[in-house]
Image (tube, coloured by chain):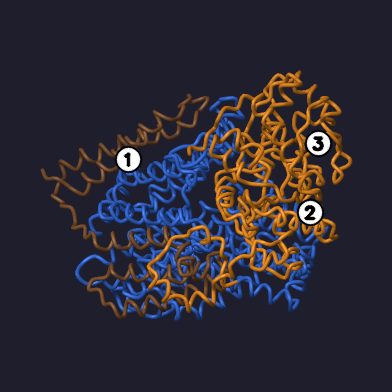
Chain colours: A brown, B orange, C blue
Amino acid sequence: MAVNRKDLAAGAIFAAFGATYAAITWRDLPIGEALNMGPGYFPILLSSLMMAMGATIAVRSLGSAEAISLAAMPWRGPLVLSLATVLFASQLEGLGLFPGILATALIASFAASPFRPVPALLASLGIAILCTLIFGYGIKLPIPIIGSWFRWG
Amino acid sequence: MESIAPFGARKGRSLPSLVRFSFVALSLAAAAPASAQSADDYPNRPVTIVVPYSPGGATDIVVRAAARELTAMYNQTFIVVNKAGAAGQIGAEFVSKSPPDGYTLLGYPENIYSINPFVFGEAANAVSQRLVPVTNLGGSPTAIAINTTGKMKDVKTFADLIAFTKSATVPVTYATSGVTTPYHLLAQEIARTAQIKLVHVPYKGTSDALTDLVGGRVDILFGAPAVMKPMSDAGKVRMLAVSSAERFPLLPELPSISDTLPNVQLKNIDNGIAAPLGTPPAIIEKLNKAANEILARPEIKSTFERNLLLPMPGSVAEYTKRVTETRTERERLIKAANIGQMALPQ
Amino acid sequence: MELLSNLGLGFSVAFQPMNLAYCFLGTLLGTLIGVLPGIGPLATIAMLLPLTFGLTPTASLIMLAGIFYGSQYGGSTTAILINLPGESSSAVTTIDGYQMARHGRAGPALAAAGLSSFFAGTVATLLIAIVATPLTEIAISFGPAEYFSLMVVGLVSSIALASGSILKAICMICAGLLLGLTGTDIYTATPRFTFGSTELSDGLDFVAIAVGVFGVAEIMRNLEGANAREPIIAKVAGLFPSRDDLRRMIGPSIRGTVIGSLLGILPGGGALLSSFVAYNVEKKVSKNSAEFGHGAIEGVSAPEAANNAGAQTSFIPMLSLGIPSNAVMALMVGAMIIQGITPGPNVINNNPDLFWGLIASMWLGNAMLIILNLPLIGIWVSLLRVPYTVLFPAIMAFCCIGVYSVNNSAFAVYEITAAGLAGYILAKLDCEMPPFILGFILGPMLEEHLRRAMIISSGDPTVFVTRPISAVLLVIAVIALVIVSLPAIARKREVVFVEED
């Protein structure tokens, strides 16, 4: 008997997700009945199923044939890439298309280890120029090429 | 096209001056000139018109047609941007918070002022209060159509429909493009006044509903006449009446429902243009005049009429009055239908 | 032969130099926007619509149609090369297409996608020409009960999409179904799972979610370890399919075409299902089913044939009834109206030159696409030689800007962030994404049709078995369920599961 930690974690996540959705549904949405379904009917069905399945996966993982440990989770890549997308979403309108893409690509480059500043900067510049040409001048997205932050007044 | 100022203009955030300085060279090429608030040289840079729905709908069609003519008239680009979502609230809210300088306008579907404030709560109401009408463009009444082959094959008029529904042994169903749409409100009003029972089947759009009407799975369809007309011409559905108090000039053969049910009517669903509150009246007047000029052009007229949208010229005062009247009418219908606050959570 | 004279008329229209030029322009634009994530045919057609006012109605429709089916071609390119489905229809192509690319077989995978699509496009065009009118009867006979049963078939077969644990696959489907319900309930206007956000009141954006769980999560995995792992392990071996590859593509292309053509006719979202169903059918009937999920060329051919056939036949309800089967078709209806043509049952009689010219141009467009795309394969594949440290920031930038442009909304870009992180963590726990994505697409439709069917039947659940088409579909669903849960297959799945680690 051994523990499959991957399945244990997956089962726990599914069960927790199901439970959260079931709780929200129960609190906010009328369930109705099979012949007259309310907006909560389908969600409560699915979230209950998910809770049950998640719990089953977790319980079965405790009696696994072989022990499987969690693979290492290097957090640098995911965190840096998430930061890059969040920065893009929150600052695009202030920065403008060209600086926004330059910053996003540059920050994303930090996710690679080792990070080499000069090639990363050059690559990001190239990406920003390319994207500005395609999206700014080609597709004419309604975003200023240079945002209001870089203006007087 | 390098720059469209309204996006960033309201965000007066400051960066360290050194950074700002270093970007001066770049920004000089792109930045828009500081906007003069006078109407004489308006527009001196591109104007953005936000359509709060996806491409292809009535609001999108009239605004794009108008934008094309305005661009030619002023030799200045009028850009149409679709910002769809939350029954138009996302785009409307964006414009309501934009600088009131005439360079960000809203394609103005009627539900923004006449329905959303009463079903989506205070935030939606606040958005509608921060918008002022500029010009109406085009609108159409609601039409009522039935399936021609099924149990209602002998129903030829709107009066027949009421009589049929009164004596029906199985529930009569009607389709609309959704809960709290004007179509839904009209159907409820008819059911109340005529004292008949109608079962609502909501769809995501009138086209979806039309398929089920042709297939005989629902009995009645309430929706925009432009969507039903082709099927009606082909004899697959029968259009019975329109919702306006008078006949609709583009479909003169259809009677008004108020011929059968006096006092029951639904004002046309208008699509116009609005501006953020505080926009200089001179600019609003200028845009309104330009729009009226455009609406008289034959190519615009024919584009609208092919979509069964009646061009609606008129002064700012006339449009504002119309907005208020429509709002009052829909508010009464919503209260009467006992549709509570659906509340987009805010 | 009326058909021949009709086609003759069509080709004489389509071969007019202007129409030919706009057909080429449309397919070229379509290919390009298909490659860019986010920028879809809908946004492109909306932007180009004003430019078509000056054209003849036929030329403008030929160009707009070209953009639509061209984007289906382009969408599979990024799916294969960098695990990024540009369109919902190419989500399935990532499963085996990306694996082929990782094994150095990006060239054959792209060629398989192109050739299968061309085959499917040719057959589907012919199908439209021969049986467009009778086929519309099928579209009309599909009501909520039939759609619900069809979605059940899709749901059951989606379990087969997974190569790992069935329980986990079911959980991922449920998660997809639940997240798909985010937004305003169409029957009561009640907001569901929107957490107080106006932006969520129309639901999560499909493109953002797909870009996150497939594209961004994959980059995160590739960046693990001390050195950025080059995701393409094997050397690129040969650009074009071998004779054996070609032989293996024939069956899947034919089956994919049949499935795609039939499902494409249904206006209620059938086309979305076609690539998933074609993939699952192939996985069941193929001799090489063990190879699926590890780079089977059949797993590229079948869904690509299906989605292209579906793209072509989805014109049928639009042309013959005026009923648009998706948002792009709705815009085409708008384009016709602007041009003074009333879409509907009368188009074929009133505007035969337009009707047949458009159909003929679709075949020409497909031919142009294959001529355009085969030489491009070399260029696409050489893109993989770009160092990954340059490639991945570029992909990130393109994803962000592309998703932003879908609705000019920053909110969708946050959705990428969340979906990317969730996709990465779940992938580390051996949970697979294709069942999730199918659940996400099906969830809202399944519920919509179920509840509508119940309203129309006044709460009588027997409609699903008393209506013949619905009953047949439910029987198919039961058979599929039995096949999925057969012990022999379950054992094979375990083997595949072990092999993978």
Closer to the camera, C52 or C346? C52
Residue C50 percent location from the top left of the image: 70, 65
- Label 3 – label 2 distance at C-alpha: 18 Å
Q: Which residue is mark 1?
A: A17
Q: Residue furthest left?
A: A1
Q: Amino acid at mark 3?
A: Ser
Quadrant of image for the N terminus of chain B: bottom right
Residue name at image x 86 percent, y 36 percent? B246
Which label belongs to residue B304? Answer: 2
Image mark count: 3
Q: Are marks 1 and 3 on the same chain?
A: no
Binning the other alpha carbons within 10 Å of mark 1 as few (below 14), some (14 to 19) or many (20 upward) gives some
Q: Is residue A64 visible?
A: yes
- Subunit of label 1: A
Q: Is residue A16 above or below residue B51?
A: above
- Label 1 – label 2 distance at C-alpha: 50 Å
* Residue A132 falls left or right of residue B298: left
Asked if the residue under mark 3 is in contact with the one under mark 1, i.e. CB atoms within 8 Å, the reply is no
- Subunit of label 3: B
Closer to the camera, C482 or A144? A144
Residue B344 percent location from the top left of the image: 51, 38
Indicate which label's residue lies in the foreground, 1 or 2: 2
Q: Which residue is mark 3?
A: B244
Q: Amino acid at mark 2?
A: Phe
Q: Amino acid at mark 1?
A: Phe
Q: Are marks 3 and 2 on the same chain?
A: yes
Is label 1 in a helix, a strand or a loop? helix
Binning the other alpha carbons within 10 Å of mark 2 as few (below 14), some (14 to 19) or many (20 upward) gives many
Is label 3 in a helix, a strand or a loop? loop
Is label 2 in a helix, a strand or a loop? helix
Q: Quadrant of residue B219?
A: top right
